[in-house]
Amino acid sequence: MTQSDCRVFSIDYNRIIGVLIRNSHFDLAERYYNEMKPVGFSLNSLTFSKFICGLCKVKNFDLIHTLLNDMDRVGVVPDFWAYNMYLNLLCSESLVDIALELLRVMGEKGREPDVVSYTIVISGLCRIGRFDNAVEMWHTMIRKGLIPDNKACRALVFGLCGSGKVNLAYELTLGILRGQVKFNTEIYNTLINGFCRAGRIDKAQAIKTFMRRNGCEPDLVTYNVFLNYCCNELMLEEAEKLIEKMEGNGLEPDGYSYNQLLRGLCKANRLDKAYKLMIDKMEAKGLVDVVSYNTIIRAVCKTDHSKKAYNLFDEMEQKGIAPDVVTFTILIEASLKEGNSSVAKALVDQMISKGLFPDRVLYTSIIDNLCKTGKIGMAQSIFDDMLKQGVAPDVISYNALINGFCKASRVTEALSLYEDMQARGLNPDEITFKLIIGGLIQERNLSVACAIWDQMMEKGFTLDRDLSQTLVNAINS
């Protein structure tokens, strides 16, 4: 632009940089910005603010910091929305201390933080568990005459209730802002859920009454929260009445509603009634899903009726309801509990053939069970499958197979696993060392046992008295 014979003014730079920002060409915008500074030109507040907002989208902290310093130098202050955009970026990256400092600087520069500013910071503080600071910000906002809106209330209530501080959430919203803020259903529901989880059904019911009195009708979520509580507490008659009440109030219970009732019936071991509910009522409404079948299959497996569970598994597939990882996990664990490892392996193969893959916890559970029942070859095969599927074993996975090898007097293979886990960046824990040393003592390979013991002590672990005494006795014998 400066290579032509035309004179270039500050306004020209503002225009072209503004266009580049609008089209997300931030590298080019930065180049022109660096070109204009040495000749004494500056961006105006609007262009600076747009530039900062654009850079927030790509998380370019360095250039944002440069722009803010340059603005200080030329006496230009960002607009509210630019400050709030930067606050949001800082809090989303858990840089809340910098956000708190920015909040202070805003006031000094004549951009007194607004409700949006405080809401962003309060939400960020709650997200990282700094609730005392969040509450302090809340009081500061109110002390400055700012009335929190529903977004602000939601940020605080979600954060506090999520950490079990429901009483505090209630006091800071419904307690001190009653009559000043028209709370929405989401806030009421969060408080109701918090009190239900805390076992304070009386308080939850009182909030429901209060919300209705203030022109906010309970919705499907409200009823589902109470339904969840009733089913957890096996208050099944109350749960059934809630379903009827929902229907009477023109609220159609959804799949979640019925699945909660199904879970409650299964928890109370009323399996026949649960199955009847699923087939007679839920199926007619098109609400039976994989969660419904998983709930009943799990309950049936707990009663050791695995044949009935497999029948349900076949039934769901015939009805076009595809089993998921949870379905297979329930059946695999049930077959392992019964000692039927061949069925468990067949289920794993079937699961993989459907494009579903066991997670590390399930793989480890299978390996551990097979090793405890002496099926080391099959356990090793499952371990190999785990690696082939790209599921990284952890220390517990390795310990399960190492334990199996040591019990089967295959300590050389256990040592190979011990070395392999370290090659993969996993550090042996106390259990690993004890298993390996115990296996080596059994094989009378005492020199290697002592070497492993040294490695164990270097890692800060110690052998228990019995095993160390066994090793010492073996050396002295």
Image: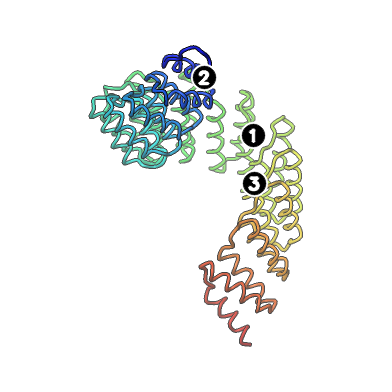
Q: CA distance from mark 3 to mark 1?
A: 19 Å
Q: Which mark is residue 20?
A: 2
Label 3: state its secondary structure. Answer: loop
Residue 413 in the image: x percent, y percent?
Answer: 72, 66
Against 85, is 7 above or below? above
Image quarter of residue 100: top left
Relative to 230, residue 113 above or below: above
Q: Which mark is residue 425?
A: none
Q: Tell me which numbered mark, 3 or 1, is placed earlier along the sequence.
A: 1
Q: Classify 10 Å Cα crowding around label 2: few (below 14), some (14-19), many (20 and above).
A: some
Identify the element where label 2 is drawn. Answer: helix
Image quarter of residue 321: top right
Left or right: 114 as drawn, with respect to 322: left
Residue type marked 1 = Val
Q: How many marks?
A: 3
Report whether residue 238 is seen.
no
Is residue 403 found left or right of 96 in the rendered image? right
Q: Which disc number belongs to residue 290?
A: 1
Which residue is found at the position 72% from the left and 30% from the top?
319
Q: Residue furthest front?
A: 5
